[in-house]
Image (cartoon, rainbow, N blue to C red):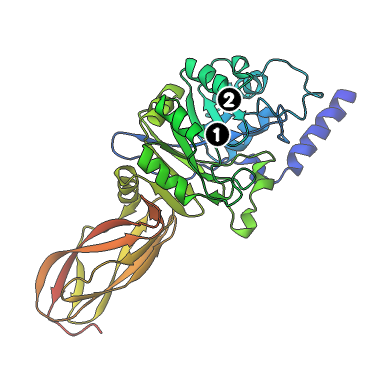
Amino acid sequence: MKSVQKTVLVLAWLVALPAAAQIAKKPAVPAIPGYQTLLCDFHLHTVFSDGQVWPTVRVDEAWRQGLDAIAITDHIEYRPNKKEFASSDLNRSFEIAAQKAVDMPVLVIHGTEITRDMPPGHLNAIFLSDVNPIETETWKEAIDAAAEQDAFIFWNHPGWKRQQPDGIPHWYDEHEQIYSEGKLHGIEIVNYKSYYPKAHQMAIDKKLTLLGNTDAHDTIGMTYEADLGESRPYTLVFAKEKSAAAIREALFARRTAVYWQETLYGDSLYVAPLFYESIQVPDTPLVLHGKARAWVAITNRSDLVYRLELEAPVGGYEIAEEVVLASGATVPLQIRSLNSTETNETLAIRFRVTNILPRPDQPLRVTLQVPVQRLASQDAK
């Protein structure tokens, strides 16, 4: 009888769960030629450092929000819950999360956060085999121990005001030392709810991999208020396949972009094909009767949003100066002929995508090819 009651209680608890908690939804982000696009978060905490959640929660969250890979990066030096979770093995949170992920489509990457004063501040080391040797006396010994394991090492929240009071990332001699030794490979240009333009420029100048991570300590649902329009950042990894080895190769090759708050940051080598793979322009000609207006239907097949501004006029035509390609929507782009001469041609319409930034404050430039058949008739007005 007790077992029956227990079963009923469990079922009642499951029924009481919010529907969203039981549904996995993977954002639609297209692949680009030669690579898969993987959604990742390489900076997450659990109760084994100063987080508020058990390691398995991180895997469940990732599955529900469609992530392909996460890294568990608990602090080494700061573990306020150490008394409650007395394991002396610094690998324990990763092991618990990895075991949970065995039968799930989420890759869990072994990592840690090296938590030191500025400079050099906080750094993450991922793709580790053993965190324990990284618990060292000095930050340099910790970096060296991570490098000995061929870790991918990146600088966390470089503009964090608790370490950079002006909120601006500063490149110190210590960073130059780590970098010149080949032991600094990436930098967070987005952390939690902040974008650091100077860190973005540093990444370009120093050829560092771009990363955007949550640095979540609480649940993702309590970290980002979806009802207020907040969203978690994603590191988009352009990998040859979905595997830890392929992600590692892509990170070292700098094949990443960052998507946060409807803005995409990344090298045009990757974000341009991502844009073109997202949208579809009809290949049948748009028929324009005389000087009447018509609309070409542009479909955004992704869950990303693109904001376009016309960069240059097209001779003989009037074209809408702004268009927002909403996620998963078909959007009309207005075109009007300025004369009634009959012709068949393909318009090369140049836009700036204001929310795709290959460099800080420098939007991506794209060209849409729109076939047009212009008729002399004035019937449609």
Q: Position of residue 257 (x, y in %)?
A: 41, 42
Q: Is residue 329 above or below residue 87?
A: below
Q: Nearer the viewer, residue 248 or 304?
A: 248
Counting other residues with Cα less than 10 Å from the Cα at mark 1, is it few (<14), some (14-19), or many (20 or more)? many
Q: Residue at x 64, y 28 (%)?
A: 74
Q: Position of residue 220 (x, y in %)?
A: 64, 43
The Cα–Cα distance between marks 1 and 2, rounded to whole angstroms, is: 8 Å
Q: Nearer the viewer, residue 183 or 223?
A: 183
For the N terminus, which image quadrant? top right
Q: Position of residue 298 (x, y in %)?
A: 32, 61
Q: Position of residue 151 (x, y in %)?
A: 48, 22
Residue extending farthest front: 173
Q: Residue at x 58, y 52 (%)?
A: 166
For the residue marked with disc 2, what is the amino acid?
Trp
Q: Are marks 1 and 2 in contact (CB under 8 Å)?
A: yes
Element under disc 2:
helix
Residue extending farthest right: 1
Q: Which residue is the site of mark 1?
A: 120
Q: Residue at x 35, y 29 (%)?
A: 240
Q: Residue at x 49, y 38 (%)?
A: 172
Q: Which residue is the site of mark 2?
A: 139
